[in-house]
Image: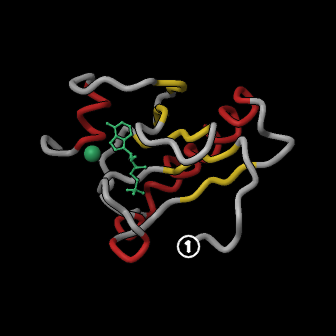
Amino acid sequence: MSDCLFCKILDGEIPADIVFESDTAIAFRDINPQASTHVLIIPRKHIATLNDIEADDEGIVGSLYSAARVIAAAEGIADEGYRAVMNCNAAAGQTVFHIHLHLLGGRALSWPPG
Ligand code: AMP
Ligand code: ZN
């Protein structure tokens, strides 16, 4: 998608602090971090929202969680705990319409989120 911010990061048109890459996903640090670890994990395939995930995408979406596990271990937050969440559409605060898992950790996270 030519007008998608995260596709531009995938294409190298916009710089990002990339911390993980696989065949199906990449991850980079959030530009406005909400915790000491705040990484966004995105599929290489452009999928706009969680509502647009298709049955064939299950492997790709699963790979986002596998990436979260690897990154949490690398960040040293796996044992203390962390959160991996995906916002969908306006009421949840989604602002970039290329799905992304927020990996947040390094501080106590309240529940429920606001
Ligand atoms: P969401 O509100 O769930 O769509 O999350 C979008 C996230 O993308 C926000 O946490 C932003 O801070 C983050 N973000 C926006 N632009 C960039 C960028 N150029 N590089 C890294 N993160 C970004
Ligand atoms: Zn995209």
Question: Which of 66/9 is in front?
Answer: 9
How many residues crowd mark 1 within 10 Å: few (<14), some (14–19), many (20+)? few
* Residue 11 in the figure: left or right of residue 35: left
- Residue drawn 26% across the image and 38% down it: 7
Q: Residue at x 14, y 44 (%)?
A: 3
Q: Could you tell me which quadrant the N terminus lies in?
A: top left
Residue 6 is situated, as x and y percent measured from the top left of the image, at: 30, 40
The residue at the far left in this view is 2
Please, which residue is most extreme toward the right here?
79
Q: Is residue 45 left or right of residue 62?
A: left
Quadrant (top left, top right, bottom left, bottom right) of the C terminus: bottom right
Ligand 2 resides in the quarter of the picture at: top left
To which residue does mark 1 refer?
Answer: 114
Q: Is residue 62 above or below residue 69?
A: below
Q: Report helix, strand or loop for mark 1.
A: loop
> Of residues 64 and 16, which is closer to you in this image?
16
Residue at image location 41% in from the left, 37% down from the top: 31
Mark 1 residue type: Gly
Q: Quadrant of residue 47?
A: bottom left
Q: Quadrant of residue 73?
A: top right
Q: Position of residue 79 (x, y in %)?
A: 86, 41
Instruction: Tell me the colour scheme of the image.
Output: secondary structure
Q: Residue at x 31, y 53 (%)?
A: 96
Image quarter of residue 89: bottom left
In the rendering, at what x and y percent does residue 12 appear? 27, 22
